[in-house]
Amino acid sequence: MDEKIKQFKRMLEESNNVVFFGGAGVSTESGIPDFRSKDGLYNQHYEYPPEEILSHTFFKNNIEEFYRFYKDKLNSLNYEPNVTHIKLAELEKMGKIKAIITQNIDGLHQKAGSKVVYELHGSVLRNYCMKCNKFYDAEYVFCSNGVPKCRCGGTIKPDVVLYEEGLDDETVKNAIDSIKKADMLIIAGTSLTVYPASGLINYFNGKYLVLINRSSTPYDGIADLVINDSLGKVFSQI
């Protein structure tokens, strides 16, 4: 493993346009549960499956239950960035990392200091009235009683991509553009099984493709370096 981390560091040193693409595994070491592991949200038992609760149809038809789950399980306000978030922000400040693409909605990359972050699935930090489009912060939503309402009387919806909803076109475009320009792509903390996010890897034509994940992914065979270990262990040595 030490040899692989040395190789990872050498690749970083040789690269000038690095893009980091991360999933739920980036935030688990901050204490935020992921979705698909054996202890993840999708393997816990609720009155409805989490995949159903986090759908556009469920939000529209059963909004009280949606917000009970959302406030209970997706409130990231009391979590802090871990070593991976912090190291990525430092690498961006050094000019190495040009963009972070994340499937997470917790806002921890920005909390750590990263500036160029493309959030494929939105963020709990942004919320909008469905009637007048007024912005509300996460504190307002998570501290509200029941379904959060705007001063105009409209219902507030988190700016997160629910099942049955499409990704934001501009965010996807920016993510693709950054990957196309990268000479090194680091993919970490994701199983690469969720489309269309997993398809972004196909736009990379750079020199080094690095996969860091506790378990194997469908793309391990095409990577220049695969590290099956915790992100914290890897990034704490960078």
Image (spheres, helix red, strand yellow):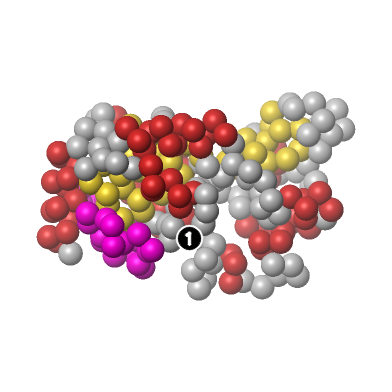
**Measured along the vertical axis of the image, is residue 129 above or below residue 212?**
above
Q: Position of residue 11 (x, y in %)?
A: 17, 45
Read off the residue under disc 1.
193
Relative to residue 20, is residue 142 drawn left or right?
right
Taking the spot 72% from the left edge, 59% from the top edge, the residue there is 53
Quarter occupied by the N terminus: bottom left
* Amino acid under disc 1: Thr
- Please rate how many residues cluster around mark 1, counting C-alpha atoms within 10 Å: few if below 14, some from 14 to 19, many from 20: few
Judge whether residue 191 is colored magenta: no
**Residue placed most toward the observer, 11 or 231:** 11
Tell me where the magenta segment starts and ends, as one range. Answer: 213-238
Taking the spot 38% from the left edge, 33% from the top edge, the residue there is 178
Q: Position of residue 26 (x, y in %)?
A: 41, 53
For this orientation, the residue located farthest to the right is: 153
Q: Can you see residue 108?
A: yes
Q: Can you see residue 233?
A: no
Judge whether residue 215 is colored magenta: yes
Taking the spot 49% from the left edge, 68% from the top edge, the residue there is 37
Q: Secondary structure at mark 1?
A: loop
Relative to residue 86, is residue 192 drawn left or right?
right
Q: Quadrant of residue 166?
A: top right
Relative to residue 89, is residue 79 drawn left or right?
right
Relative to residue 227, is residue 190 drawn left or right?
right
Taking the spot 52% from the left edge, 66% from the top edge, the residue there is 36
Q: Position of residue 67 (x, y in %)?
A: 74, 52
**Residue placed most toward the observer, 125 or 167:** 167
